[in-house]
Image: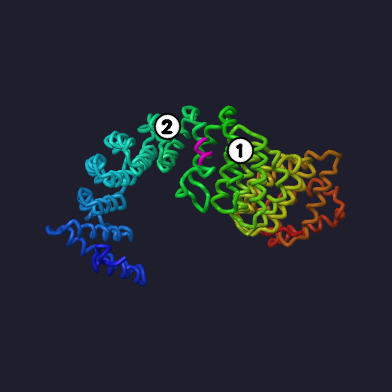
Amino acid sequence: MSMMSAHLSKDFFDLVKAIGESKSKQQEDRIILDEVAVLKKKLPEAGVTRKKLKEFLVRLVYVEMLGHDASFGYIKAIELTASKNLVQKKVGYLCSGLCLSPDHEFRFMLVNQLQQDMISANYLEVSAALAATVRLATSDMIPPLLAHVLKLLSHDRELVRKKVCMVLHRFHQLDASAVNHLGSEMRRTLCDKDPSVMAASLCLLHALIESEPAKFKELVPSFVSILKQIVEHRLPRDFDYHRMPAPWAQLRLLRILALLGRADQAASEGMYEVLGDVMRRADTGINVGYAIVYECVRTVTTIYPNATLLDEAARAIARFLGSENHNLKYLGITGLAQVVEGHPRYAAEHQLAVIDCLASVDDTLKRKTLDLLYRMMNPVNVEFIASKLLESLEGSNDEFLRTALVSRLCTAAERFAPSNAWYVATVTRVMELAGDLVQPEVSQQLVALIAEGGDEDDELRATAVDRLAAMLGWEAIPDGLLHILAWVLGEYAPLCTVYSLPELAAKVADLAADDARLRGSPRARS
């Protein structure tokens, strides 16, 4: 764009160039402070034209954007919103929206100008006012503006009607009680002849349905019909993204259907067909398609269950888990967690694929996988999953991941242990690998269990004694494990089969005399 066509002076372009070429923050600050001095001098001048004022306000935005105070020029932005020139008016609104803090008193000074622009015969001025309202409105500004905004719902321009939906959604975010009574108006907007208006209305409807889904149950057929029209490419191609029809509208509709179908068999039955269709059509191998498939999985697991859809969701999850892309694996793990929460039977078939994700170099994926494995644990698979988690604990250097693994393993061992012997072996192994991360109550519970004995006389105690006696040769013993070792060997040393009593006593004495070995809490010795 040339300087002439942009209607901006050489001074402005010199400013932008100087900022871009500055070599340090200090140099940049000097440039901005010089600009502040220039603006403070020129803005109050009596002969400043609105065309020139527009440029000064753009420069003012640069000042604010780079962290300096430009409050001396805010009032000029308010004044420029009254310009009859549309570009100047937009710059005034833009500067006000970018610079005025949410609690700034100048915001309320714009109410009268916004009201005037909303009743303008020029729909572009109306649109500019609505766009500014989205950015500038506060909860105190809603009462004087709401009536003017609602009148524009019947405006003959789709651009205006779409922006009205955006303003009402913003009002709901600021004060839900101000627009909760507008359900009937939004129902009519949902049926607007222009798809862009319909899509904009979904945001507010979603917010209203989140708070009171029962009031909107009768809209399920309408939402299903709209979603069906979208996936069948009945909307103009302008709404396609990478050949995917209106993907953001699809995502919003799926979230709405999930809310309306939760614990409602009648409402859910009306969705089953279109959900299956959406899932199949979206699986095209592109990112936006994966997003829609994942949202379908979330919806299917939220509404009243349908076996066919759950099977299809499980197949989609399997494809995610089998991908080489870490982002898709993460989607698969997250989706499977939602499926397993309500339908545990799907856990077993994906167990190995989930465990493989523990070996990922992606820390976020590993943590998400750990959470899922914990949810998947039950008395049937606890031994297998625990063994894999122990392998992961042994190979991990990430302190946060190790802490989470220790916590999950100890809790799972307590909840699902198939036998006392397995519990003792597992917790002891955890303490060998990360004794410094085990909570004291876990150690106390282990001691109490050994004291109570096992299923067959002293077999449990003998096994524990032998395992602990074998640790006497370690270079260092974790603190928590040392206490257990001392108590168990002191109580049940005669049961030891690894060493004779004199040998055992000698090794304990050697350990007690070696301060270096007593103070350590290193990683396990196999």
Q: Within the magenta stretch, is there residue 226?
A: yes
Q: Nearer the viewer, residue 480 or 276?
A: 276
Identified at 34% across, 71% down, the residue is 22
User: Where residue 231 appears, x then y in whole percent?
Assistant: 54, 43
Q: Amino acid at mark 1?
A: Thr
Q: Callout 1: 10 Å neighbours few (<14), some, many (20+)?
A: many
Q: Secondary structure at mark 1?
A: helix
- Residue corresponding to mark 1: 301
Closer to the observer: label 1 or label 2? Answer: 2
User: Where residue 476 appears, x then y in whole percent?
Assistant: 71, 60
Secondary structure mostly seen in magenta is helix
Q: Quadrant of residue 30?
A: bottom left
Q: Amino acid at mark 2?
A: Arg
Q: Secondary structure at mark 2?
A: helix
- Can you say which quadrant of the picture contains the C terminus? bottom right
Q: Callout 2: 10 Å neighbours few (<14), some, many (20+)?
A: some
Relative placement, left or right, of 180 versus 106 is right
